[in-house]
Image: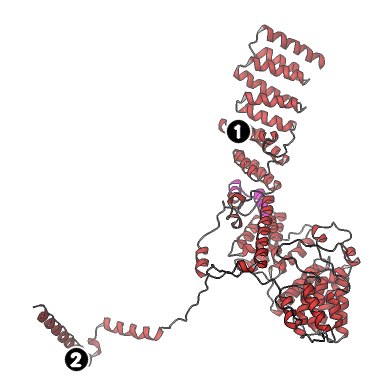
Amino acid sequence: MAAPGRHVGHYISRNSRFLLNSLEQLLGRRGFGCTSALQQQAAEANEDSTETIVIPRKKTWNKEAVLEALASTVSRDPTAYPYQFQDDPYLSPRTSSEFKLYSLSQESGRAAAKYFVNNNPKFFTKDFAEPHIPCLMPETVSLHLEEVSEEALKERINLRKVSAAVDMYDQLLQAGTAVSMETIHDLLDLISLYCDKNPVQDGGPQTEDSEESGEEVKRRKGRVRRATDYLRSIWKDGNNAERIFNLLPDRDTRCYSALIRGMVKHGAHAKAFNVYTDLLNNRLTADVHIFNALISAAPDVRDKYTERWDLVAELLKQMSQQKVQPNLLTFNSVLKALRRCGPLARTQSLQTLNEMKALGIAPSLATFDHILAVFYRAANSGESDTDILQEVMSEVDGGTLTCQDPDDVLFFSSAMRICLDNKDLELSYKVQSLVEVGENWRMLGDSYQCSIYYGRFFNLLCMMEHIDVVMKWYRRLIPSLYYPNPQGLKDLLQALETDSRLDLLPAIWKDIRSLGHDNKLDVVEEVLTLMAREKHSPEVQESFAQCALDVKTVFDGNRGRPSLEWSTSTLSNITSLLLRANKTQQAWAMLQLFQSNNRVPPEGLMNEFLSVCHNNGSARGAVDLVQLSAAFCLPATSKLAKRTLAEFDLTEEQRSILSELESAGETFD
C-alpha cells in the first residue's frame, strides 16, 4: 500500500505545480499590477545580485599567518621578564647588570652552538621544523672550490673570507686569468667593509690594531676616550684594498665608491677626499653613496664651523652638477654634519628640510633627531624648544614606523630628554603613545638606549605626576621593560614623600632588594630617613619596624656580599623605628652597635628611648640607658639622670647610681 500512495502523491504534487505556473502566466498577461510586490522585489534583488557578484582573487597566506594572528591576541605581561629569558626562569634577571650578564651569556652560548653546527654540518642533517627555519640549519662556512678560478673567488667573497679572497685574486693575477669587474667590485666592498681583516665568526675574540693614524689622534685630542675607541679598526696605508685598486687598469665609479666608503668608515677621512679628487681628475661621476660618505666626513677634515659648512655646500653643489639624485641618507648626513657646525646649524637645517620637501623625500626619525639636536642646543638661552618637538609629533603621531637610517633609534631617547628638561608631561605621554603603536618599540634601540628612554620617562613621572599614576607606571614598566638605577629609585622615594604616601615604603624596599640596589648606601639611608621622619599609625609603624630589621641584615653582611658601613644616622633611624613599634629589646641591641662601631648616639634618640622606658615602666632599662650614656661621655648624661630620678620609681641602689652619674655629668659639663 505504501508504493501506490507514494505514486499518487507524486502525481498530485506535479499537477499542482503545473496549475500554479499556468495561473501565474495567465495573470502576468492580464496586467503588471496583478503581480505581487514580493515577487517584484525578489526579481529585482536577484537581478542586482547577479550584476554585483565579484569572485574574489585567491588569497595566499604565508606559513606564519596563524602564528601571527595568535600573537596579535596576546598583550605584553608587565609582571613577566623579557621574552628572551623565559626559556630558563632561573636565569631571569633582576637588575640591569644581571640583564647585561645574562644577555651576553645567552648570546655567547648561541654563538658557540652555531659555531659547532656550522663546522660539523654532517651531524645536523635532519630538519624537523615546520615551517622550515633556515637559521637553525648549518650554514656553509667551509670552502669547497680549491682550484684557481673566478668561481672560487666568488665563493670566498660570499663566505666573507677576506684573506682567502685576496690570496685567490693574487693567484688569478699571476695566472693571467681575467676577473670580471662585478667580482672585483664585490671584492673591494668586502675588503673595505672589514678593513682588510677577516670578520669575527659568531662572537669569537676580535683583535684590533692599537696603532692609530695621526689624523685619528688629532681628531680625538681634547675629549675623553671611550671604550669603543680602543676597539676600532684603523685604515692602514697601502692595505689590500688600496693595492688591488691601484693595480686595476680601468677604475669605474663603483671601485672608487668601495674605497671611499671604507676609508670614511674606518677613520681615514682626509685620504677619502684625496681619492675623490682622483675620481674627478679621471673625469668620472660619483654616485650618491660617495657623496653621503664624504658629507658625513666633512666635519672631521675642517676645524672651523664656516669651513665645515662650506665643504658640505660644495659637495652638494658638485652633486647637482653631476646630476646625482640625493636620497634620505644624503639629507640625514647633511643634518648630522650641521650638528657640528655651531650657530650655522639652525638656519641651514631649515633650508635642508625645505629642500627635502621640494624633492618629495619623506624624513625619517633620524632626520627629526638631528633637527631636535640642532634646535635644542641653539635654544639653551632660555627659549622653549618643545614647539619643534610638538610639530614633529604631529607629523609622526599614530603612525607605524620603519627603520630607514641607523640613527633612527636615537630619536625617542632624545625626544624624552627634551620632555624631561622642559618638564612637559603631556608631550611625554604623546611620545610614549607613539612607542606603543604596533611594533614601534623596536625603534627604541638596544637595551642601553631603551633603559635611557624609560629612565627619563620615569623620572619625569616622579616629578610631575600624582603618586597613584606613578605607581601604576611603576608596576607596568618594572621589571618587564625597565630596570631602575639608584637615581630612579631615589626619584620614586621623593615622589612618595611629596604625596605623603610613605606607607608604601616597605613594599618599595622589597623591590629595592630584588633589584639588587640594597648595597647602595645612599638609597638605603634615604629609605630609613623617610620612615623615621614622622610618626604614623601603629599599623604603619609596625611595618616600618619590620622593614628596618630587614635593612639591618644588609649591614650585617650575611648574604655573601660585602656589608655596608654603619653610620650614626642609619643606626639612629633604625633604633627610632624599633622604639616606635615598641620593640625595646631589638632597639637596645641597636644601641650596643653604636658602641661597637665607634658611633655616638644623638641626644634626641636617648630621650626618645627614655620615654619608651617610662611608658613601659622599665626602671632597670632607664638606669642602664643612663649608664650607657655615661659610657659614651655624652653631655646629656646629667639631664637623663635627673629625668630618670624624677619620673621613675627607683630603688635606693639605683638612686645612688644615678646621683653619682648626675654629679659626674655636671662636673664634666
In the figure, is residue 46 to the left or right of 104? left
Classed neighbour count for the residue bearing mark 2: other residues with Cα under 10 Å, few (<14), some (14–19), many (≥20): few
Q: Is residue 187 above or below residue 635?
A: below
Classed neighbour count for the residue bearing mark 1: other residues with Cα under 10 Å, few (<14), some (14–19), many (≥20): some
Q: Residue furthest bottom?
A: 29
Which quadrant: the N terminus?
A: bottom left
- Where does the magenta region start and end? 454-471
x, y percentage for residue 298?
A: 84, 71
In front of the other: label 2 or label 1? Answer: 1
In depth, the one of 116 and 410 nearer the eye is 116
Q: Quadrant of residue 500?
A: top right
In depth, the one of 628 and 160 nearer the eye is 160
x, y percentage for residue 341?
A: 83, 67
x, y percentage for residue 416?
A: 69, 58
At mark 1, the secondary structure is: helix
Which quadrant: the C terminus?
A: top right
In the figure, is residue 246 to the left or right of 615? right
x, y percentage for residue 73?
A: 50, 62
- Give the residue drawn at x 49%, y 68%: 66
Do we see residue 347 in this rendering?
A: yes
In the figure, is residue 229 to the left or right of 11? right
Which residue does the numbered mark 1 point to in the structure image? 546
In depth, the one of 287 and 28 nearer the eye is 287
Which residue does the numbered mark 2 point to in the structure image? 26
Q: Quadrant of residue 430?
A: bottom right
Q: Residue furthest top?
A: 652
Q: Quadrant of residue 383?
A: bottom right
| Residue 196 is a magenta residue | no
The circle on residue 333 is none
